[in-house]
Image (spheres, rainbow, N blue to C red):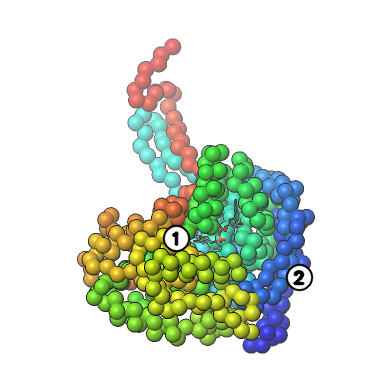
Amino acid sequence: MTNKHQKFKMDQTLQRLGISRDNQGGSCGTQFFASGASIGSHSPVDGELIANLTKVSEGDYDKILHQARKASAEFRLLPAPKRGEIIRQLGLKLRQYKDDLGKLVSYEVGKSLQEGWGEVQEMIDICDFAVGLSRQLHGYTMHSERVGHRMYEQYHPLGIVGIISAFNFPVAVWSWNAALALVCGNVTIWKPSEKAPLCALACQNIMAEVLKENQLSEGVCNLVIGGAEIGEKIVNQPEIPLVSFTGSTAVGRQVASKVAARFGRSILELGGNNAIIITENADLDMAIIGAVFGAVGTAGQRCTSTRRLIIHHSIYAQVKEKLVEAYRQLKIGNPLEHQNHMGPLIDVQAVKQYEDAIAQCKNQGGHFIVEGGVLVGEEYKSKCYVKPCIAEVENSYPIVQHETFAPILYLIKYKDMEEAIALQNNVPQGLSSAIMTQNLREAELFLSSAGSDCGIANVNIGTSGAEIGGAFGGEKETGGGRESGSDAWKYYMRRQTTTINYTKDLPLAQGIKFDI
Ligand code: NAD
């Protein structure tokens, strides 16, 4: 596809998603307003300016908060299955916009078009899940110790849920949170990454259509585009009882302490340092595909990207050879073109971090068997394209202990399963982990309480690419949050225990006597 042709097609995509050359970066439903500074969104694919946006100012933020407050008072009264109907309609719209939204994700953040569409599919899946959930917000009932008393638990909406998201899943993370928050009766204020504001605007436009068609209050879903200054307003806002934060551990650490200081709740989805253990009983063809997709998918910019391979010493040389061969076949280029496996990093700052990590790895003793480097030439004019690389390292190197958001894969050798598990666990992060084996004992040990310490532990599947049905999140410096499936919805509601006395007496619990 020529540049001119691609630009024409992207213009049409933007138009269908309601994005013009100049946009307002703050909105309640269909009402747009923003009076802050202007920012441009540039594509890492070709370096072109996609569109300009006006960020929200502090005053705009206050107006949006006011609208959210008003909307919350009404929306929480809507029966949960009716809220589910809103999300059902959102899922239908997303099916309609899947092609365009997937293309915008690919163009604005540089992930492959397949992964862009996959991200929108994940939004559709969570909508379906949330629709069913809207009729299953169950609490327990329990037997009272007192005669003629009934006890039960019920769940109520929290109010306003703040969503702060990272650049690398610019649409899915919003939907994971918004679909659950809304069926639970909350309204939302979303601050997306300033590196992917147009994806957020497109989602807001789609949601606004649904709100309008259902004559719902404008303030049910709100968008605030801005940087850390707006994120901090959400974090410090006592009226926002839950802040769902997805991003780096460094920022998450600050968010966690600020929200906790005001007794708010946070869901923290932070950095990972994910490993696959490849045992001598692995199906090697499967292991190589899982490892390569995990390491180079989204150019190594997934929280679940495979960063470390822990390989049994008896097959180490063979795995190394197969990896080198697989990397030789990788095609790097425009992610909208289907033959390319890997697109660019998000921006030149990310390229700098990649180069620094390679230099540090070499200084610390790492030996590169596939060399990295920045790609140059007309196709790579955005200066964001890099070569995926592989280094042999020790797990204890400081750089290996750190999450570098780039396609750098570390190889580590092990002798027995206990050592493999210790290596896998011996990093500060605890998001995703995997073992490739056809041996039941190895797999079960890995999954046992003496096994992986991560929030996600897979057998014969790589570390990246989770389904929405399970609760998603990780331990240690990954933050401990859970989003998406299973019972993650409970984070978005407040729990109330109720005891009803239907007698004429007032017996006290624990048999305490109090007569007047
Ligand atoms: P980041 O931490 O730089 O930014 C994340 C968000 O926080 C952005 O919206 C940013 O504007 C906002 N922000 C920055 N400073 C803030 C502050 N002081 N107060 C409030 N908000 C603030 O992360 P990023 O570079 O966009 O994303 C990459 C990181 O996100 C990686 O570490 C990755 O592992 C992590 N991530 C984790 C998950 C997960 O589910 N565990 C998913 C996606 C990404």
Q: Position of residue 310 (x, y in %)?
A: 32, 68
At 26% from the left edge and 56% from the top edge, which residue is drawn?
A: 450
At 30% from the left edge and 81% from the top edge, which residue is drawn?
A: 318
Q: Earlier in the sequence, mark 2 or mark 1?
A: 2
135, above or below 358, in the image: above
Q: Secondary structure at mark 1?
A: loop
In this view, the residue in front, 232 or 61, is 232
Res 471 quadrant in image: bottom left
At 45% from the left edge and 55% from the top edge, which residue is drawn?
A: 478
Q: Position of residue 245 (x, y in %)?
A: 54, 53
Work out which residue is located at the far top of the displayed protein and give it.
516
Q: Which mark is residue 18?
A: none
Indicate left or right for 258 with 154 as reference: right
Residue of label 2: 21
Q: What amino acid is at disc 1?
A: His
Q: Quadrant of ligand 1?
A: bottom right
Mark pair 2, 1: CA separation: 39 Å
In this view, the residue in front, 48 or 207, is 48
At 37% from the left edge and 39% from the top edge, which residue is drawn?
A: 142
Q: Report the quarter where the N terminus lies.
A: bottom right
Q: Position of residue 91 (x, y in %)?
A: 57, 66
Res 105 quadrant in image: bottom right
Q: What amino acid is at disc 2?
A: Arg
In this view, the residue in front, 429 or 339, is 429
